[in-house]
Amino acid sequence: MIQEVISATKLIDFEGVSKTYQLGNQRIPALKGIDLTIESGDFIAIAGPSGSGKSTLLNLLALIDTPTSGDIRYNNIDVSTLSDDERTRYRNKEIGIVFQNYNLIPVLDALENVAFALQVQGVPTKECLKRAEKILREVGLGTHLHHRPANLSGGQKQRVAIARALVTNPSVVIADEPTAALDSKTGMEILELMKELNYTKNTTFIFSTHDNRIIDSVHHVVYIEDGFLMNRY
Amino acid sequence: MNYLQFAYRNILRHRRRSFVTIMTVCLGFVALGVLGGFLNNIFSRLKGQAVVAERFGHLTFAKKGFYQNGKLEPEKYLWNAKELETLLAVVRQNIDVELATPRLRMFGVTSNGKASTIFVTEAIVPEDDQKLIKTNVDGRSGIEGMVTFGARNRDNSSVIVGSELASMLKIKKGQNVTLLTSTKDGVANAVDVKISGDYNTGNPATNDKFILSDFSLAQNLYDTDGAERVIVTLKNPENIEIVKAQLIEELADAGLQVEAKTWDELSPSYKKVTTLFGIIFRVLTIIISVIVLLTVLNTMQMVVSERTKEIGTMRAIGMLRGQVIKLFCVEGLIMGVLGCLLAIPILFAIAGLLQVMGISFVPPVASVAVPLVMMFKIKNLLLVFALFSVVAIVSSFLVSRKIAAQQIVDSLSRG
């Protein structure tokens, strides 16, 4: 196992994190004793072949899954001790998630999709819409505020998804192959957008990818294979 | 975007399915509304029959023990003139009392000279009976075709007989019959009386033996200057139990130990019919509610199944389990409420149609045809409304509780 210390200021700290899935009588180890520390403001790609455990690692980083063993700390808070509701609230405030297939809510327009992340916090609707509009303008969708997902292109949908992830001012945005469903040009635009937001807002971005062009443009790459954290550069 | 708007848009996503669910709730509501409307009408007509046609009024006061031993020792349970005067004075001074009138009831044999049959006579004060037959029962004043003595120029030796009794003895208005009964002391007594009319009591059990006679005639026949009961009608019958208790207390203070019975306690047929139909209605309510529950459950199951990934997304973004459940409950509630709202005009249209068609029927344990109409009680409709809304919420809760508890990664991996 490799102790992966990317920076001195800890945002996320994984200690001996393992994840095993039970498939019938079979136990399938997806992650094996991962030790990983991530600093705030970083821009990290998680790379590795299919089935290596990238998505599992991202799920654990996003707090939408729980490890079989090991400790996960966010800002020195042991998140494994939090209840489901506490973890959800924490995730809502501190973590933005971008999905490969955008996962926008089809009955809500772009503005409402972004505002949704704030509304579940109980922020007043007016305030939610104001903040959502601001962030949508920042990602270049000021003219598409009231378009529903069905009327947006793939790139535009991903921009909405990024806006939704950022609207709560999270410490970290976790994206699972955010450019995989996009053509290369649009994919690069989305990457540029994330880099810009990382730079301007100092938001940490962690995303998985297979795309070498993306890997070349990040601060750090975490390479994972067969559930082991193999390397970083 | 609040829960209502969000849920409403989700309902519109699956228009056909939502429409079927809403229509199921609607038809359930209409079915219960129609049945309840018919039953309310039947119950109300039977109530009118008991209160007015059978002359029970709302409350009946008798000496304590009268209902247990009054037939064995009638003289012991008669109010004398002084007691009757006190009783009427106390009762009439209660502001909730509309009418208080003395009564006597006798049993015996009546004959047309050729044939005889048993009779039951209820002795009434004609002036009071004029008022009693106009008693308001569920918004209807009196009963159509109800007959009583004229208030003035009356002949106290005339009687009004049940139509079936008149038919049995083949007697008509203006003819005489003999009433053979006994005095309070058990001595046989008879009187010839003139038929001044016949009427249908509404109850086949009494229509073939019932005779309305003048109170003073009955007093003579029974050899008393008192009465055995006092019938009371109330301005607001909904307060019947309160007034009953008040009057018992006030009469006790005046030195009269009484027992009081409400009209429904004295009308066993009303009790039986309402009990039977009440059971049928409850069973149907349960069956229809279960159908509504299963339909909404099925719809929500399909909705949840199709939106599992979306639920996972919402949970990942920060929606709490409780908020997911709330969203689906609101969706179920909207469908329940829309179904009920849609049912109300349909219900009133059916009621209006029946009114126009003018169909009538003879209710169980009645001998008079009543119009086949529906009588709606806002309280009952609201109860069904609330029931179906709760059923819709419960169905949604049962389904969404499970999906909300699912691991987010499992939800996200679907579809």
Image (cartoon, rainbow, N blue to C red):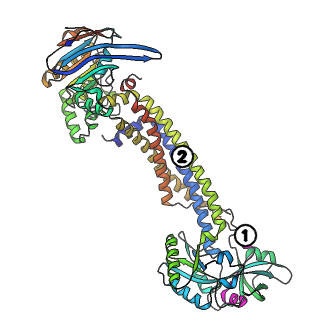
Residue B303 lies in what quarter of the image?
top left
Chain under numbered label 2: B
The residue that appears at 43% across and 29% down in the rendered structure is B306
Residue bounds of the magenta highlight: B205-222
The reply to whether residue A181 is visible in this rendering is no
| Residue B341 against residue B193 in the figure, above or below | above
Q: What amino acid is found at the position of numbered circle 2 in the picture?
A: Ser
* Apparent side of residue B276 relative to residue A193 in the rendered image (left or right): right
The picture places residue A91, in percent across and down from the top left corner, at 26, 29
* Apparent side of residue A29 relative to residue B293 in the rendered image (left or right): left
| Residue B148 against residue B152 in the figure, above or below | above
The picture places residue B152, in percent across and down from the top left corner, at 62, 90
| Residue B317 against residue B205 in the figure, above or below | above
Of the pair B135 and A111, the residue shown nearer to us? B135
Of the pair A194 and A18, the residue shown nearer to us? A18
Of the pair B267 and B358, the residue shown nearer to us? B267
Chain under numbered label 1: B
Quadrant location, the C terminus of chain B? top left
The residue that appears at 80% across and 75% down in the rendered structure is B168
The picture places residue B205, in percent across and down from the top left corner, at 72, 69
Kindly identify which residue carries mark 1: B205
Kindly identify which residue carries mark 2: B289
The residue that appears at 50% across and 83% down in the rendered structure is B253
